[in-house]
Amino acid sequence: MDDALRDVLWRDAKVLYEAIGLDAEKIPKQRDIICALHAVRYVVLCGGVGASKSFTAAQAAWPRMLEPAMDGAEPTPRYWLVGENFDIPRTEFEYILQAFRDFGVPVPICNQPKEGRWEMKVPGVCLVETKSWTNPDSLHSRPVQGMIICEAGLLPPNMWYERLRPRLGRVPGSWVIMAGTLEDSGPFFKDLVRDVVIEQKVSNWYGRSIATWENVFTYPSGLENEEIKELRRTTPPDIFKERYGAIPKAVAALVFREFSHTFHVGDYKFDKHRPVYLGIDPAGIYAVNAFQVHGRDVYIVGEVHLDPGTSERAIEEVVGRPWWKNVTHGVMDATQVDPREIWTSGAIWKALHKKPVPIRHQKVSVEGGIELIRSFLHSGSYDKEETPPEDIWEFQGKSGVSRLHVDASCTNTIFEFAEGYRRKKLRSGEYSEEVVKRHDHHVDLTRYFLADQFGFTAPSRPAARAVARRWRDSRPTAMP
């Protein structure tokens, strides 16, 4: 959003905020969030601790809650304030309720019990409800015209893809504000901050980072505020930047910097009409992934993660999964002789009354495997005539598409790719080419599988219109 557009939007919105006594000229970053929701549908607000995230999200949302019902919505538009529990969104609820009253909007129905869901209703205008994502039954299947996700850094990605986003998808023009802090947040929110706030590479999304000291109501002298100066003096610099400055810690250590929830994670369930291949890493933590191949695209549709684990336990686990009946063979590191024996002829199969599957094996170097995985995370090989424009994205100045897709339920796999798999830090502060042997189990079995299936070169042959048939990844740009 450029300055000219922001100024036009603010000129139209200014009168609303003057009516409730808010001078947003004094809070320019918060004002940008307020304006953005009138220009785009999806907003990411990354704030430091105490940076006025709740206030800003509520001020951006309440005027839109007074708009007419959009096509596909219920006669009285429904809005959700969603948090990990019912208590978290209450601050946003109270800010919105106060804004309605200051603006002269009567709120005849307002229920605020000590425990559970809060709601306010302006008949014929809007219904605003608090929701808890740890109580999925409260996220009933109703069209939702707008949503604030509070403390979005804690939001499990599968809750967004499976419960929240589909509710918004039922109302054309619906909107969402994701507000959260970086510290202790999961890779899903950190990915959004990187892609939307920092790199600004996701269409129809806008993001802003607001530091703690930019909350001028609490810290009128900004960085020179005595409390902020004390925090800066007593907090390690990298923690201060993330906790209060809303600046992500360095990601230089990450091996797969191109991995992103936005482009690689979605709702990719087991396809019963296609074969399944297992990738197995039996060292220490026992990891198994279920792979399916659609043309040139690879989908991880299930995972097993046992800590600690044995081959027998892993076999017991996989034979109970719905995708087991489609398994044709497994792939394992060539050095794992004993586990391979158990998978191919161990006594466990008789006890389970099952037949073992063939296990293939070969040595795959770490660096060679890393480059192979990269070629699938961001592939420059795609059919431009058949690939929808929104499937093409840019990484490090090069256009490509994602060929490796992970179902949102595979949380351990996602963690390793997005955050856990790192290079060793040297005393100089730089990072070596050596990879730390930690959080590498699902990554390792992925390189075994890709090398077995494709060799060490990503496929470049046409996929016989596979692009048109393959699953579409559930990223924000694909949202209707």
Image (spheres, grey):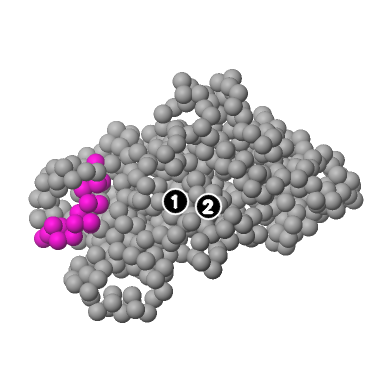
Q: Position of residue 135 (x, y in %)?
A: 48, 56
User: In this view of the protein, which residue sits in the foreground, 44 or 70?
Assistant: 44
Q: Which mark is residue 82?
A: none
Q: Position of residue 31 (x, y in %)?
A: 20, 54
Q: Amino acid at mark 1?
A: Asp
Q: Residue at label 1?
A: 191
- Image quarter in which the N terminus is found: top left
Q: Is residue 158 visible?
A: no
Cα–Cα span, label 1 and label 2: 8 Å
Q: Amino acid at mark 2?
A: Ala
**Residue located 25% across and 52% down the image:** 33
* Count of marks placed on residues: 2
In the depicted view, which residue is nearer to us: 442 or 168?
Answer: 442
Residue picked out by circle 2: 418
Q: Give the residue at x 57% y 38%.
A: 375
SS assignment at label 1: helix
* Kind of element beneath mark 2: helix
* In the image: residue 153, left or right of residue 266: left
Residue 347 shown left or right of residue 29 in the figure? right
Q: Is the residue marked by circle 2 packed among few (<14), some (14-19), or many (20+) residues within 10 Å?
A: many
The answer to whether residue 387 is above or below residue 211 is above
Asked if the residue under mark 2 is in contact with the one under mark 1, i.e. CB atoms within 8 Å, the reply is yes
**Crowding near pointer 1: few (<14 within 10 Å), some, many (20+)?**
some
Residue 30 % position (x, y): 23, 57
Up-down relation of residue 227 to residue 58 (above or below): below
- Where 288 sits versus 250, above or below? above
Front position in the image: 413 or 382: 382
Residue 179 drawn above or below residue 145: below
Magenta residues (range)? 21-39
